[in-house]
Amino acid sequence: MAFAIYVCTFCFFFNIGSCDGGDYQFKIDKTIDAFNGNAGIVQEKMTMFIHILENNVKSVILNYLGIITFGIYPVLSIFKSAGIFGVIFGFSTMKNGVYYSLAHTLPHSIELIPIILSAADGMYLGVNVGLNIVTAAKSKIDISSYSKRLCIYLLLIVLAAFLEVFVSMNL
């Protein structure tokens, strides 16, 4: 379900981005901007690695906190992520072509897998808790399996941040 929401939202906002004739200039984060002339400096790569890692770990943890919001936060997180990516990708495709856009976004998209999967877990846990509160039929949540998945997703996030900074930014 989380994947379907992501794809539908991405497609909707992709169309908006690809049909918009505006001449926008996106602001670049200072950390990202530091790479323009100095891609070989290790300290800046470590700063970028930590920056990307913090953002992605925060996303995964907040998605799991969907248990508190009855699954609403992970849905909003997916809408936000897919919407922003869809608009930017649509606009880039319109301005730069499909090949250029794919070549410059796909290597940086590895973290989407654990983020979408953590959102699915957060939605399921939140809805399950909500149903347990409302209905008389109580279903048991296996916290250990979700804890293991969270650990796997966090490891994937670390790997994705490493690959993004130290491998795909050099392509």
Image: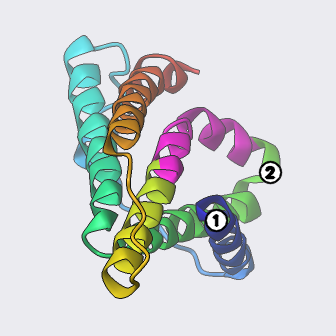
Q: Nearer the viewer, residue 15 or 110?
A: 110
Q: Amino acid at mark 2?
A: Val
The residue that disc 2 covers is: 98
- Tell me if mark 2 has few (under 14), some (14-19) or many (20+) residues whose alpha carbon lies within 10 angstroms of its own: some
Q: Position of residue 64 (x, y in %)?
A: 32, 55
Any magenta on residue 101? yes
The colour scheme of the drawn protein is: rainbow
Horizontally, residue 125 falls left or right of residue 65, namely right
Q: Amino acid at mark 1?
A: Met
Q: How many numbered discs, if any?
A: 2
Horizontally, residue 14 falls left or right of residue 38, namely right
Instruction: Identify the residue at horizontal 69%, vertical 70% (top origin).
Output: 14
Q: Position of residue 124 (x, y in %)?
A: 47, 63
Horizontally, residue 89 falls left or right of residue 30, namely right
Any magenta on residue 5? no
Q: Position of residue 48 (x, y in %)?
A: 28, 31
Q: Quick check: 168 above or below 99?
A: above
Q: Quick check: 169 above or below 68?
A: above
Q: Nearer the viewer, residue 134 or 2?
A: 134
Q: Nearer the viewer, residue 102 or 64?
A: 64
Decide if residue 167 is in sight here: yes
Mark 1 or mark 2: whose residue is earlier in sequence: 1
The residue that disc 1 covers is: 1
Instruction: Identify the residue at horizontal 49%, vertical 66% (top origin).
Output: 78
Tag in front: 1 or 2: 1
Q: In the image, which residues are magenta?
A: 100-117
Q: Position of residue 145 (x, y in %)?
A: 41, 37
